[in-house]
Image: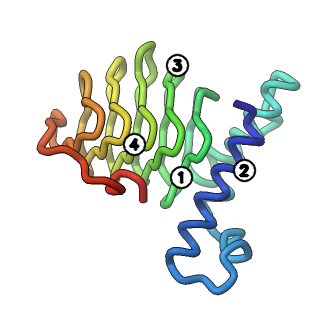
Amino acid sequence: MEPLRALRSDGARVVDAVRDRGARFPRAAALADPSLWAVGLLRWGAVLRRGLGTSLGLSTLLRVGFHIDVWTDDIGPGLRLPHPFNIVIGDGVEIGPECTLLHGVTVQRGAGTRIGRGVVLANGTTVLAGASVGDGSLVGAASVVRGDIPPASVAVGVPARVVRASRPGEAAP
């Protein structure tokens, strides 16, 4: 998917989140949301890399301004970063659509490292190289994922273990 189309989907999720918090003018309020700015830098950097072979410093601005270091452009639409700080996404990582990453998340580089559709990675989660998190799963705070987490699961701990199935709507804030 084109990065700018993905940005439209990302922005729609931010507007929905602001609306859910009771904003009177959700589109205007979304412009002040730092997650929209962080995802915008990420997507525009991808556009420039595709067209020019360089992000013209947008990746550096994302790194300096938000402490977000992204080494892949394989990120699905609808990305949500409610607290967009201290996030690392390594090279070769695939992130599905409608995912939510909270602050302090690290997804290590490596072939086969995959985050499925609609996954929520809570504060301080680390996904080790080669691990995968199934669609609709929720990974608890400060968990370390190694291996595979099945779809529609809630996993917590070090190493992360499945504790129950996720409930409808639970993994998509």
- CA distance separating discs 1 and 3: 20 Å
Q: In this orientation, which residue lies closer to the viewer: 40 or 171?
A: 171
User: Residue at left 51%, top 45%?
Assistant: 98
Disc 3: which residue = 92
Q: How is the image coloured?
A: rainbow
> Is residue 152 found left or right of 84 in the rendered image?
left
**Dot 2, how many residues are within 10 Å of its Cα: few (below 14), some (14-19), or many (20+)?**
some
User: Quadrant of the rendered structure where residue 68 is?
Assistant: top right
> Residue 109 location, x and y as percent?
45, 22
Q: Mark 3 touching mark 4, by CB under 8 A?
A: no
Disc 1: which residue = 80
Judged from the image, the secondary structure of the residue bearing numbered disc 1 is: loop
- CA distance separating discs 2 and 1: 12 Å
- CA distance separating discs 3 and 2: 24 Å
**Dot 4, how many residues are within 10 Å of its Cα: few (below 14), some (14-19), or many (20+)?**
many
Q: In this orientation, which residue lies closer to the viewer: 164 or 35?
A: 164
Judged from the image, the secondary structure of the residue bearing numbered disc 4 is: loop
Disc 2: which residue = 8
- CA distance separating discs 4 and 2: 19 Å
> Residue 150 location, x and y as percent?
25, 30
Q: Amino acid at mark 2?
A: Arg
Decide which of tag 4 and tag 1 comes sooner along the chain.
1
- CA distance separating discs 4 and 1: 10 Å
Q: What number is the disc on residue 119?
A: 4
Q: Is 150 above or below relative to 34?
A: above
Q: Mark 2 touching mark 1, by CB under 8 A?
A: no
Most distant residue in the top direction:
111
Decide which of tag 2 and tag 1 comes sooner along the chain.
2
Q: Amino acid at mark 1?
A: Arg
Most distant residue in the right direction:
52
